[in-house]
Image (cartoon, rainbow, N blue to C red):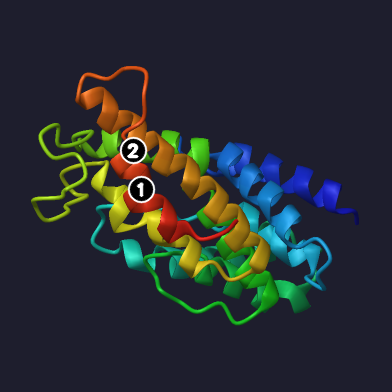
C-alpha cells in the first residue's frame, strides 16, 4: 500500500476518532511534522512508513504543558498507538509496531528519552522544528494564552536582572527552551533547519525589545549581538 493511502487512512481515523481541542496539536500539526520529517530523511535509509506513522500518532495522547504527568504523555501515546494499529489498522505490518512505538515514545522533550533508531531521531527533530520559526512563534503564544500566562515582563523582557520564569512570562520560554533546541537535534539537517528558524526568533526578540523602548522601526542591536553568535553557522 502506498504512503499516500496510509496517510489518507490515518487522517480519516484522526478526524473521526481523535477529539482534540488543542489547536497547537491538531491534525494540521501532525501533517506539518510529517512534511518536515520527509525533508530530514531525504537520502537516508529510514523506513518512511515508520516515520510517517509515528508523525501522525505521536500526540495521540496529549497532556497539557502544566499537567503533572506531562513527562509520561509520549509513553502513553506509544501504548495507545499500538492499540490503534492493532484494532483500527490490522493490515499495518506488525513487524513495524515496535519501531513506530519507540519513535512515538522518544519524540517528547519532557520525556527525555534517547531515540535509538534513525526513524526516531527524524521524528524527534521534525516535531521540535514545529516549536521554532514563524509557526513555533504562533504556537508558543497560543499555548501560553491557553495556560493564562503573561506575554512578557515589560520592565525586563529578557530577564537580564531577574530569574527566568516561563511559567509566568511566555517570552522567557525562548531562553529556557527554544533557543537551546538546535543543540538537541539528532540529525545534521534537523540541526541546520533549527538554527535557521531560531535566528528568526532572535530577530523577533530584537524587534519586540525595540518596540518596548518606543522604537517601532528598528531592531535592538544588543539583542542580536547577545543571542545570534550562539547559533553558529546554519
Circle 1 Cα neighbour tier, 10 Å, few/some/many (<14 / 14–19 / ≥20): few
Q: Measured from the top left, where is residue 107 in percent x and y?
A: 52, 65
Q: Quadrant of the C terminus?
A: bottom right
Q: Quadrant of residue 99?
A: bottom right
Residue at 80% in and 60% down: 42
The residue closer to the viewer here, 151 or 48, is 151
Circles 1 and 2, Cβ within 8 Å, touching? The answer is yes
Q: Is residue 142 left or right of residue 3?
A: left
Residue at the spot of label 1: 225
Position above or below: 28 against 197: above
Q: Residue furthest right?
A: 1
Image quadrant in which the N terminus is located: bottom right
Vertical order, 93 against 89 (above or below) = below
Which residue, given by chain and number where applicable, does mark 2 sit on?
A: 221
Residue 92 showing in the rendered view: no
Q: Is residue 49 visible?
A: yes
Around disc 2, counting alpha carbons within 10 Å, would you say few (fewer than 14), some (14 to 19), or many (20 or more)?
few
Q: Nearer the viewer, residue 213 or 66?
A: 213
Quote the CA–CA distance across marks 1 and 2.
Answer: 6 Å
Residue drawn 53% across the image and 46% down it: 197
Q: Label 2: state its secondary structure.
A: helix
Amino acid at each position: 500500500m502506498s504512503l499516500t493511502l496510509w496517510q489518507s487512512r490515518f487522517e480519516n481515523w484522526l478526524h473521526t476518532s481523535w477529539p482534540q481541542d488543542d489547536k497547537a496539536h491538531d491534525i494540521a500539526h501532525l501533517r506539518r511534522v510529517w512534511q518536515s520529517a520527509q525533508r530530514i530523511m531525504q537520502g537516508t535509509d529510514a523506513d518512511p512508513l515508520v516515520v510517517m506513522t509515528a508523525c501522525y500518532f505521536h500526540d495521540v495522547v496529549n497532556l497539557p504543558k502544566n499537567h503533572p504527568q506531562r513527562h509520561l504523555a509520549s509513553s502513553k501515546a506509544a501504548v495507545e498507538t499500538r492499540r490503534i494499529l492493532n484494532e483500527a489498522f490490522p493490515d499495518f505490518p506488525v513487524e513495524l509496531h515496535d519501531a513506530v512505538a519507540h519513535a512515538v515514545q522518544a519524540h517528547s522533550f519532557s520525556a527525555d528519552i534517547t531515540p535509538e533508531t534513525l526513524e526516531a531521531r527524524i521524528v524527534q527533530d521534525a516535531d521540535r522544528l514545529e516549536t521554532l520559526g514563524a509557526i513555533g512563534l504562533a504556537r508558543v503564544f497560543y499555548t501560553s494564552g491557553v495556560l493564562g500566562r503573561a506575554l512578557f515582563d515589560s520592565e525586563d523582557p529578557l530577564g537580564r536582572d531577574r530569574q527566568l520564569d516561563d511559567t509566568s512570562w511566555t517570552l522567557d520560554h525562548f531562553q529556557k527552551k527554544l533557543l537551546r533546541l538546535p543543540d538537541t537535534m539528532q540529525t545534521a539537517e534537523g540541526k541546520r533547519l533549527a538554527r535557521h528558524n531560531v535566528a528568526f526568533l532572535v530577530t523577533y526578540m530584537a524587534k519586540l525589545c525595540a518596540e518596548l523602548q518606543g522604537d517601532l522601526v528598528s531592531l535592538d542591536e544588543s539583542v542580536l549581538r547577545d543571542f545570534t553568535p550562539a547559533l553558529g553557522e546554519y
